[in-house]
Image: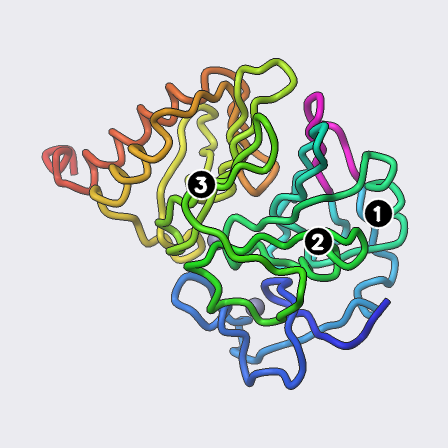
Amino acid sequence: MTTTFAICATCGVEHSYPLPPVCAICADERQYLPLDGVQRWTTLPDLEDGRTIDIEEIEPGLHAFIVQPPVGIGHRPLLVQTDRGNLLWDPPGFISEDAIQRVRDLGGIAWIAASHPHMFGVQLEWANAFDAEVLVSEKDAGWIARQGDAIRLWDGVLELAPGLSLHRLGGHFAGSAIAHWAGADNKGVMLASDTFAPNPDIGTVTFLWSYPNRIPLSAGTVERIVNSVQDLEFDRLYGNFAPFPILHDAKAGFMRSAQRHIDWVSGKNDHLT
Ligand SMILES: [Zn+2]
Ligand SMILES: [Zn+2]
């Protein structure tokens, strides 16, 4: 494993040397520095100590990565299998020989895409292991902290394979994206990450500019997001953390949640407060 880069210990994103005084992603208003305000860096060899990546099938053709102990934000990456190649979505901030072998057995990786910069992880390191492309939403290119030849910028809608496409919706970040996949049953699967995040009530989502600091998106932005996904069908919806997936009728829940959000941020429910 290479040690030519470091990983922010708070968000798990790879950075080239020379390192900045603070990780820009963590210092941003949407995220946070460690409690004492001191930036911490780690490296792959440091993270290797006893750490594992379990890979579990969560529905036919869709696998989840469980990194233990978690790295950075501790999100849950997903691997989508297609006949044309596989997509690693929201790559982890860690990679291991065991995980590489397991992913090889699942057909390898053709494309790597993060929904937004909090999820970049060690995307170039995964790309190097599989000779894969790293697809970065053009509007978030300024957040890339480790450049490499594998990186390709995209915007709008990017069709990767029949039934698998990336859509830039913006919101949480200007480049925030979702992946839409037909699913083995063709009913549609939304890999929403936190472009809109599933809630504990199992069936609704929320739209925030900052999740940890709870800053909402406006009615206009949510309307724009709704317009961008209106033509996509999806039965299931997965966020970038394991809890609260919507496993049935997800689009109806999404549409209901969007209207609810718009109502609340436009003051329609002020009489209840
Ligand atoms: Zn960071
Ligand atoms: Zn985020």
Q: Nearer the viewer, residue 112 or 42?
A: 112
Q: How many marks?
A: 3
Residue 163 position within the rendered picture, expressed as x and y whole percent measured from the top left: 57, 26
Which badge, 1 or 3, is on the more N-terminal residue? 1
State yes or no: residue 207 in magenta.
no
Above or below, 182 against 75 in this view is above
The yes-or-no answer for disc 2 within 8 Å of ligand 1 is no
Q: Which residue is mark 2?
A: 70
Specify the quadrant of the image occupied by residue 17.
bottom right
Residue drawn 72% across the image and 36% down it: 85
CA separation in Å, label 2 and label 1? 15 Å
Residue drawn 12% across the image and 34% down it: 268
Label 3, secondary structure: give it. strand
Q: Which residue is mark 3?
A: 157
Q: Nearer the viewer, mark 1 or mark 3?
A: 3
Which badge, 2 or 1, is on the more N-terminal residue? 2
Magenta residues, start to end: 55-65
